[in-house]
Image (cartoon, grey):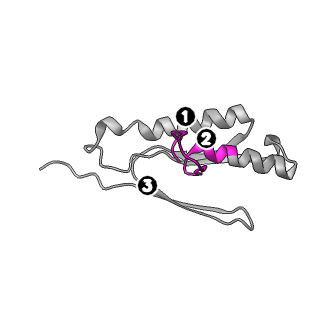
Amino acid sequence: MMPGSSGDRDKEDSRYVDDALRIFERHMRRNGTGAGDYEGGLIGGGNMFSPRVFADEREIGRLNVDDTLSRLEVMGIRVVARDCGGEGYRNVAFDLWNGELRLSHNAPELRLPT
């Protein structure tokens, strides 16, 4: 997820954390539940590129994670698990039936200059 949308769109986009949490809040109200009925988990925020590529962009993942954690705290949703930061990307599979989460973290090979 990206931290914030530009706000100039006609439709909410759940790829952006502000939109996704707005959608979630709407569903909580509709279902008569509150933030205390939920637990959160946060996965991602890693640098998907080699450490030598886009070095000035390396903080984007950390900023996204920090922003999301802050928003969840304001909402009152307790974060019970996280796997954030580092190098590489993650594959996540979430089973809606039983809540099981499967995660693999694929870090890039570090190649030293020759």
Relative vertical location of residue 15 with respect to residue 7 in this rendering, above or below? below
Q: Mark 1 vs mark 2: which is more N-terminal? A: 2
Q: Is residue 8 magenta?
A: yes
Q: Residue at x 68, y 63 (%)?
A: 100
- All told, the count of numbered labels is 3
Q: Is residue 67 left or right of residue 89?
A: right
32 left or right of 18 in image = right
The amino acid at mark 2 is: Asp
Q: Main secondary structure of the magenta part?
A: loop
| Front in this rendered view, residue 23 or 54 | 23
Tell which circle, 3 or 2, labels the residue nearer the N-terminal end: 2
Q: Is residue 55 left or right of residue 94?
A: left
Q: Where residue 34 sits in the image (x, y, percent)?
A: 83, 43
In space, the residues marked 3 and 2 are separated at their CA atoms by 22 Å
Quadrant of residue 98 in the image?
bottom right
Residue 18: assigned label: 2
Identify the residue at horizontal 63%, vertical 48% (top origin): 20
Amino acid, disc 1 = Asp
Mark 3 vs mark 2: in front? 2
Residue placed most toward the observer, 17 or 69 = 17
Residue that mark 1 sits on: 66
Q: Which residues are magenta?
A: 1-22
| Magenta stretch encompasses residue 9 | yes
Q: Residues within 10 Å of mark 1 (few under 14, many from 20)?
A: few
Pointer 3 or 1: first along the chain: 1
| Dots 1, 2 in contact, CB < 8 A | no
Question: What is the number of the mark on residue 89?
Answer: 3
Query: Along the line of sight, which residue is nearer the eye, 21 or 61?
Result: 21
Which amino acid type is marked by label 3?
Answer: Tyr
Q: Residue at x 43, y 55 (%)?
A: 89
